[in-house]
Amino acid sequence: MFREMRRSKQILSRETAEKILREGDYGVLALSGDEGYPYTVPINYAVDGNKIYFHSAKVGHKIDAIKNNDKASFCVVARHDVVAEEFTTYFSSAVAFGRIKIIEDDTDPDKLRGLELLADKFSSTASSQRREKELGRISALVVPVMTIEHLTGKAARELVKRGDFS
């Protein structure tokens, strides 16, 4: 169902791809947009097992695209060093493929779980009062959740040889 990577010597292990995905700050979510045009959006996220949690306003291009086609891919670049004298970059990245559902129901435990994971990742130093206040705004947004069906990782040959992906 999913293509094999053409440059097999650059494939990262599943564990390394998962690490890149877990530790990244943001990625680019790719969806099928209006009139069949691809739609990509840089977005913060949090990972729990085989699920990637996002947050979103209730309306907009991203939400419309997900409602029209739940298939998506999500790319995280962990490293991107330009090596001008070699006419290349030393990079490492992970790409997840899967399906997204939009959690709108405030009583769905997955909605609060996603928001808590995002708060833990991006606002871990916030006071408990501030955290409670923000999580109390749960009805103002939705939580798209992508279930990973396939995950790949790839790095520059030079990094693969050295085992250096961070």
Image (spheres, rainbow, N blue to C red):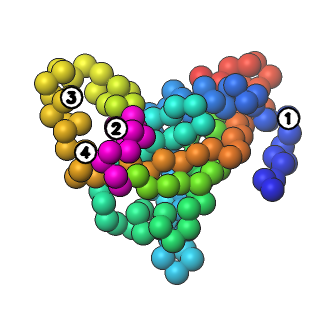
In the picture, the disc for residue 138 is: 4
Give the camera-side residue of 125 and 12: 125
Cα gap from disc 1 to disc 2, whole angstroms: 41 Å
**Residue 43 x, y percent position in the rendering:** 42, 47
SS for callout 2: helix
Q: Marks 1/3: CA distance? A: 45 Å
Dividing the picture into quadrants, the one containing residue 21 is top right
* Marks 1, 3: nearer the viewer: 3
Mark found first going from the N terminus, 2 or 4: 2
Tell me the residue at 53%/54% (across/down): 100
Q: Which residues are magenta?
A: 104-115
Marks 2 & 4, CB-CB < 8 Å contact: yes
Distance from disc 1 to disc 4, alpha carbons, whole Å, reads 45 Å
- The amino acid marked with disc number 2 is Leu
Q: Secondary structure at mark 1?
A: helix
Residue 9 numbered tag: 1
Q: Which residue carries the number 2 mark?
A: 112
Secondary element under disc 3, as helix, strand or loop, is helix
46 in the magenta segment = no
